[in-house]
Structure formats: structure tokens, C-alpha cells
Amino acid sequence: MKIGILGAGVAGLSVGHFLKNSGINSFTIFEASDLVGGLARSFKWHGFDCDLAPHRLYTDDDIVKDEILALTPMHKMRRESQIFIRGKWIQDPVNAIEVIFKFFPQDSSRIVWHYLFRSQNPETNFENLVLNQFGKGLNEFFFKPYSEKLFGIPADQISAVWGRRKIRVGGVKDIIRRKSRLYFKEFYYPVSQGYGAITDALYSRVQKNVKLNTRLIGIDKIPETQGYLCTLQRGDKTFAEHFDAIVSSLPINYLFHLLGQPLKLRFRSSIQTYLLINKSYVTRNHWFYMADDSFKINRVAEFKNFCDLSAPEDKTVICTEMTNIEGYSEDQVIRELQQIGLIHPKDVIDSKIIQIPHAYPIYDLDYENQMEIVKSFCAKHPNLYLIGRNAQFLHQDVDEIFASGMKVAEDLLRQNGSIEVNFSKAKANVV
């Protein structure tokens, strides 16, 4: 079986990794850029290992955890994260008791009152879901402004599916108990080279099977077979290759357009602004959120807090993420950080800007209808595998994508006559 893998991020590299571990070498990974890693790549800047926004490894799946920990040495870290909201710092994730005490009496009384006497609405959108679980007070305090800033559409135009997947709690009682995947207290992070050490390790295992600077520009299902003819472009040259199966991590709307099935799924772009700061630290958080809609910044990561073994002692780098990029300016980023008392413009030594065109799938009200179209289309394409957040139009963490890579490899191996994936024999590298 000849397998074509589109994209060399965590998704594509993990599929290749498991195929190769199981003795299958008849696959090629195509990557449009000259870099591997996708959204999980890292880069060196002023002596700091910088990621594309904050990443952390947390999973309850021991098999997935051991596989990833065997790739590169990692620290086990105690999570430090906060939310800046209405002029105050609170825990991340939101702790209902802390909110009630810190914002007493006005906000807290509204939150408690609306929670106790909340009405039940048809859960046809995100806002109604939140109103049913938490009431109007907490919705207007946190959920509504942050979600609208993230997606750029009103809360009542966001699909309830987003709320069920992202909130991961059933109500205020669950916020108090803090017993869900959302409330992890510890996570793993590479000892060196940033989060991209994970994808670098995967790439080192399948490098001979990877073709960089090679873009898919056409794909056709071959009549009377389950295979595909892919037209690819490398520089000014185009060529065609036949594959028995395709594994794609490309944005789903792009792939389906090439296959003749248009979709009305949209992605939200983001801008990451990296600032070199003339201070040892800005905060002790790994990341923090700026929840109010008066701020354009969504969240901020400080990489030195993830790993400072080789970082300069007297400086730090922070990365701000914005999805509301209309009228973006670096000056506004600095002003907002100054407004909350973290830096002064004179502290900024250098800056770097990276735009990510497919940062977040937008869960609008047509999301479920569009995914039904995807499901029906894929039923006619049994040898087409979609994997990763862009291809599955799904907010996923790296451990979830890695687990999907394992599953896709298992399916391909089954088709190839093998029984199961061979797991790594290496031991977890935890420092």
C-alpha cells in the first residue's frame, strides 16, 4: 500500500512515526513550507526557545503519554496560569468561589442570583448553554466576552458544540470541585528546544520520507479504485503521484474544495507578537488570559517560565496572541500590557510578529450541518483520513492529535495486513 500524508505537523509526523515503527516505509509526507512542526514548532530568538503561543502536554492516556515522553527529555511542571479580568487577577481555570469573594458585592451577587434563578433555554447555541449551566451573571462576566473576542461573532451565533467541548464542566458545582481535564495541575514540557522538540524528534525518525516545499494543488479519486491521483507543486515544477490512501492534516475547506465538495467552514486567523523584555520576568505564569473585551489580546505566554536552563538571566520573552487582528498594531499590544501594569514601553528591546492564518476553527451555528456534509462525503472515501485540528475542524491538544495519529496508523496497518502498531521500546525521559 502506497500512502500519501499531507502536512508535516504533529498529525502527519505521528502517523509516519507509527507506520515506520511497525515496518511500513511506503509512505511520503508532503509539507508546503520549508519547516516541519506546524503549530507545534519552536524557534530560537535572542537565546530563548519560543513556541507558537503556549503549549503543554497533559493526558490521562498512559500509552500516549509514555510514547510522547520517550521522544525527548521532559520536565514535569506545576501549572501556573491566571486570568486578568475587570482589573483583577484570578485563577485559571475560573474558580467560582474566588470570583464571588474577589468581586463582592456587585458582580458576585449578580453571579449568585442569576445562577440560583437561572431559566432553562433550548441549547441551540453557546450562549444558551452557558446560561443554562451558569446563569446570566457568570456568562456576562467571563464566558460571553472572551468567546466573542476569540471567534469574532456574537455568543448566540456560536455553536453549543463549542461549549460542550471546551467548558468540559456541567455547572458551578463542577467549577468548585475542579474535576475535569480542564483542571489539570501538572504538565510536561521539553527540557530544551521548546515544545518543538517533540515534532523535531518525530521528524528525525521519518526525515527520509518527508518532502518539504511541496504543495498539494490537485487531487482526484481514481475511478473504480479507492486510490487518489495527487498533483503536487515544488518550486516551478508540478508532478503527479498515485496513492492507495491519503492522510490529510490540511485545512478541511481547502482539501474538500480540491475534491469538488465546497464547505462553509471558516477559520479565524491570529497574530502572535513576541516581545524581548529588559526584565528578568514579567510574571511567574506559564500563560495568562486577558478576558475583558476591552483588550484585543487573548492570552500571553512567558517561555522562560516553561524552561530557563539556557535563557538569559536578565531578560525575558513574552508572546501575545490576538484573534481580533483588524487594525492590529504592535504599539497597541504594548499599551495593553502597560495598562495592566506588566511592562513599560521602554522595557521592550525587540519584537517579532508571526501571523497564523488557520489558528482557530470558528464554531458557528452552521457547524453541525457542515460536519454532516463532511461525514457523508468521507463515507464515500474510505481511504481518505482526516487528522489534526485543521483537517477535522476541531480544537485539539497535541496529545489528542498524537493519539489520533496512532489510530490512523492502526487502520492503515490493518489494511496492509498488519495487526497493530508497534509502540516505542524506549523509556519515558522525565527529568
Image (cartoon, rainbow, N blue to C red):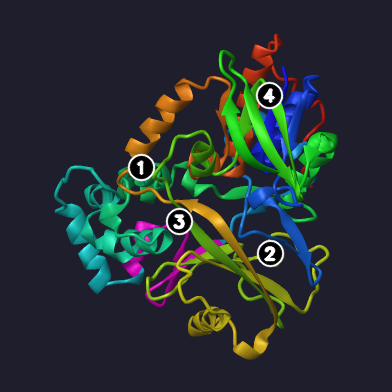
Query: What's the mark number on residue 243?
Result: 4
Rendering quarter of residue 385: top right
Which-is-in-front pick, marks 4 and 3? Answer: 4
Circle 4 SS class: strand
Which-is-in-front pick, marks 3 and 1? Answer: 1
Which-is-in-front pick, marks 2 and 1? Answer: 1
Give the alpha-carbon distance from disc 3 to disc 1, as whole Å.
26 Å
Rendering quarter of residue 273: bottom right
Mark toward the start of the polypeptide (4 vs 2)? 4
Residue 8 at x, y percent in the picture? 70, 42
Give the alpha-carbon distance from disc 2 to disc 1, as whole Å.
34 Å
Q: Which residues are magenta?
A: 81-101
Mark 1 crowdedness (10 Å alpha carbons): few <14, some 14-19, many ≥20: many
Kindly check if marks 4 and 3 are in contact, taking CB atoms under 8 A apart as contact.
Answer: no
Mark 2 crowdedness (10 Å alpha carbons): few <14, some 14-19, many ≥20: many
- Tell which of 104 and 229 is nearer to you: 229
Residue that sits furthest to the top in the current view: 417
Quadrant the N terminus occupies: top right
Mark toward the start of the polypeptide (3 vs 2)? 3
Q: Which residue is mark 3?
A: 93
Q: Which residue is mark 2?
A: 303
Give the alpha-carbon distance from disc 4 to disc 3, as whole Å.
45 Å
Q: Confirm whether residue 230 shows in the render.
A: yes
| Residue at 52% over, 22% down | 381
Query: What's the mark number on residue 367?
Result: 1
Mark toward the start of the polypeptide (1 vs 4)? 4
